[in-house]
Image (tube, rainbow, N blue to C red):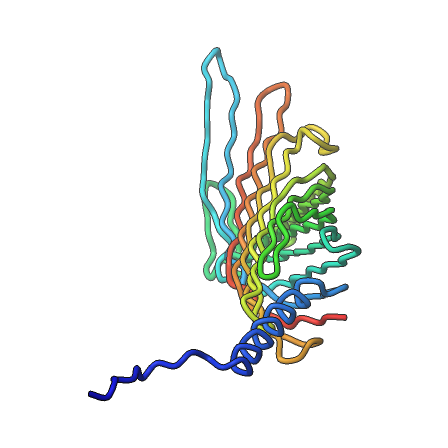
Amino acid sequence: MPRSTSSLRAPSLPSLLALALTAAMYTHAAHAQQNDRFTLRLGAMDADASSELSARTQFMGQDLRYSQDFDFGSDEIVPRLDGTFRFSDRQRLVFDYFQYDKEKTATLNNDLSFDNVTLPAGSFARAEVEFTLASLMYDYAVVDTDTFELGLQIGAEWAKLEGTLLAEAGPDRFRDSSSEDGYAPVVGARFTVTPSEHWLINLQGQYLDADWGNFDNYDGSITRANAVVEYRFTPVFGVFAGYDWFKLDATRGGRDGSLGLDQRFKGPIAGVSLTF
C-alpha cells in the first residue's frame, strides 16, 4: 500500500530567514521609536474644572467648619505641551506645561432691593481663576526592552494660582486679586509601550508635596496622571489623543483658622507630535 503523506510541510530555509528578518525589522522599528532623540507634543485639553472651598476656625470655644462646591460652567479649551529629550539609552529629560484660564460672570437682569440698598439691573460680579503648572524631570528607565519601558522620575515643579474678583453696581466698583506661586521637588513614574513602528502608548503619573518646597504658608499636594496614545504617520510627524487629570489640594493656615481649596481639572487631550 502506498504510504500517506502529511499536508503539513516543514518551512523551508528561505521562509525561516524571511520570518526572522521580518521579526528583526519589527523589533528594530519599535525600539528605534523608543530611542527618538527629541519629541515635542503640541496639543490642547478640553478641561472640566471643579472646586471645593473649605474653611475652619474657632469661635467662642467651638470648632466651626464650612465647605462649598463650585465650578466655572462650561469646559475650557486650554493649551497643553510636553517634550522629551533622550540623551542615553535609559536617560531622558521630560518637560510638561499646562495652563487653565477661565472666568465666570453673573449679571442682574432686574433691580434687586433690600433694606435701603438697590442694586440696579446690569450689576455684575466676575470671577477669574488662572492655574499654571510646569515641570522638568529626570527620567531613568529601570526596565528597558525592545517594546516597553518603565521609568522612574524626579525633578522640580512650579505652580501658580491666581484669582481675580470684579464687581460693579451702578457707580460703585470693586476689584480684588490674589496670586500665589511656588516650586517643589516632584516624583513620578512612566510606562511606555511601542507595539509597532507606528504606535506608542505612554502612561505617566506625578506627585508633589507642598512641604517639600517653597509655597509660603500653604500645605497640600499636587497630583497628576495622564495617558497618551500616539500614531506616527512618518518618523517625524504624528498625532496623539488621550486623557489628563490634575488635583490641587491646598490649605493656608493662619492665627484664626485655615482656608482650603480642592481644585480638579480633567478632560480629553489631542494634538500633534514632532520628532527629531
Depth check: 218 or 196 in front?
A: 196
Which of the two residues, 11 or 134, is positioned nearer the viewer here?
11
Quick one: 61 or 216, which is closer to the camera?
A: 216
Q: Position of residue 230 (x, y in %)?
A: 58, 69
Relative to 83, say whether 185 is above or below. Answer: above
Q: Is residue 8 left or right of residue 199?
A: left
- Residue at coordinates 46% horizontally, 22% vertically from top-left? 64
Q: Residue at x 49, y 49 (%)?
A: 50
Q: Is residue 268 left or right of residue 140?
A: left
Image coordinates for residue 25, horizontal then vertical, percent: 62, 74
Does residue 231 appear anywhere in the picture? no
Outermost residue, left side: 1
Q: Is residue 268 above or below residue 24?
A: above
The quadrant of the rendering that contains the N terminus is bottom left
Q: Quadrant of the C terminus?
A: bottom right
Q: Quadrant of residue 273?
A: bottom right
In this rendering, is residue 237 above or below 246?
A: below
Tell me: 89 left or right of 108: right
> Which x, y percent locates residue 38?
76, 64
Query: In the rendered image of this protein, does residue 198 appear above or below residue 54?
Result: below
Residue extending farthest to the front is 1
Q: Residue at x 30, y 82 (%)?
A: 6
